[in-house]
Image (cartoon, grey):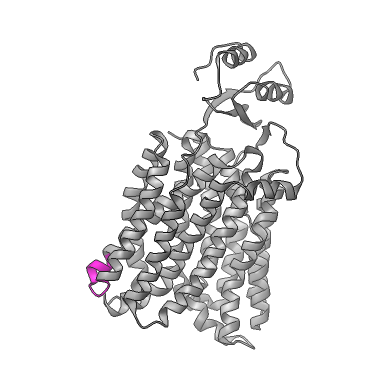
Amino acid sequence: MMNALERRSTFALSSIFALRMLGLFMIIPVFSVAGQSYQGATPALIGLAVGVYGLTQAILQIPFSLLADRFSRKPLVVLGLLLFALGGAIAAMSETIYGVIIGRAIAGGGAVSAVVMALLADVTREEQRSKAMAVMGMSIGVSFMVAFSLGPWLTSLVGISGLFWVTTIMGLAAISMLLLVPKVTRHHKNYQQGYLAQLKQVLKMGDLNRLHVSVFTLHLLLTAMFIYMPSQLIQFADIPLASHGLVYLPLLIISLFFAFPSIILAEKYRKMRGIFLTAIGGIILGLLVLIFGYESKYILLAGLGFFFIAFNVMEALLPSWLSKSAPIQSKATAMGVNASSQFLGAFFGGMIGGQLLLLNNTAMGWSILTGIAIVWLLISFSLAQPRYLSSLVLRLPETKQTDEWTSQLLAIRGIEEVVVMSDQQFAYVKIDKQLINEAARQDLTQLLGKDVAI
């Protein structure tokens, strides 16, 4: 069970994610119409105004994450949120479509998704990581549904410029949530290397690349589905566009009842690879149902439900697996590459979804997406089970300097990282139990002055 600090930090960091995503998603259902009021607006420029945020996110995730592996993560999150708020303000004050594009690009420049996830990994024990990541994944899904319902309503009240001001307020509000997250100092075995060498090391790791392919494909399929699905809900399920949020939200809630037990099974019984592959199979099953049953309202909703259940399992497992597989000293960098892959997947998913609408063959469209998911499954079969670390919670010593104490800990075989929370006067010590031998246990007992169960 998560302790009070983990619960508080998970709530705060998930809220930061949710507030950013709300600001992003509320624009999507209204801007294709409301954007026409700007000077110089064309369909292509309106599309660019919506999509440029994702492009700058994809480009800048890696630079932000490289910095986050060397410097304190919290100031970088603040910088990213200030850019997000500034971009919203510029878009709000713009009268031309070009001003909106610039504002959206600057907002996307606050590319700190990977930094927030790395910070969450710092402040949670290894055994509780999947739960924390699951909550963060769910917050993204819920913000998506809420945004699609709130966006049109808020626009009718405050207009499109007012909606951009709301995103600025959300960005500033997100900064205040960082007050709930403890200050941490990370200590690990010293692997000094340049920025380029660090990035190359991450990009050469096969399993990490398979996880990047996974998040790319997952968000490609999600984005394509949300472009392709609405017209079918209207045509075959007789559900008007304004009510689609009422379809997605119950399906999201139902999916939670399946997602959390799956995550616990993956973590507690070390079945992550099996659950991961099963979730990809669930996505394929949902898409197969849609190929053959899209003309029936209830089969259409069932296929969507299978997809949502599997999607939310994947959304929780991916960052947890990534944090286990990434090198300790390059955790944020690996998450940055993964976040860039996620945004690129959404970008290409939007392009593919638009092309599917031009097919005039619904079954063929779902078949194409199913084919993409099958290729993803084949690529993922070569994933190895991730390494499982354990965490000890230790009080900071009163008689020694913290830096000296952490150096002595890291010299012990099997201890991979020490995350110090000086304000709370304790540290998370991350251990690879497979490397701990009797000599290491004796060294640890001597350093702590007591036996520790490992």
Question: In x, y percent, where is residue 93?
Answer: 66, 76
* Residue 198 point in image, percent of width and height: 70, 46
The structure residue drawn at horizontal position 56% and vertical position 43%, both measured from the top left corner, is 120
The image quadrant of residue 289 is bottom left
In terms of depth relative to the viewer, which is nearer, 418 or 106?
418
- In the rendered view of the protein, which quadrant contains the N terminus? top left
Location of residue 132 with respect to 305 vertically, above or below: above
Is the stretch drawn in magenta largely helix, strand or loop? helix
| Above or below for 373 versus 318 | below
The range drawn in magenta is 293-301
Left-right relation of 438 to 376? right
- Is 401 rendered above or below residue 253? above
Q: Residue at x 46, y 47 (%)?
A: 382
> Which residue appears at 55% of the width and 26% of the height?
393
> Does the magenta-highlighted stretch encompass residue 298?
yes
**Residue 447 image offset from top left, x and y in percent:** 64, 14
> Nearest the camera: 323 or 170?
323
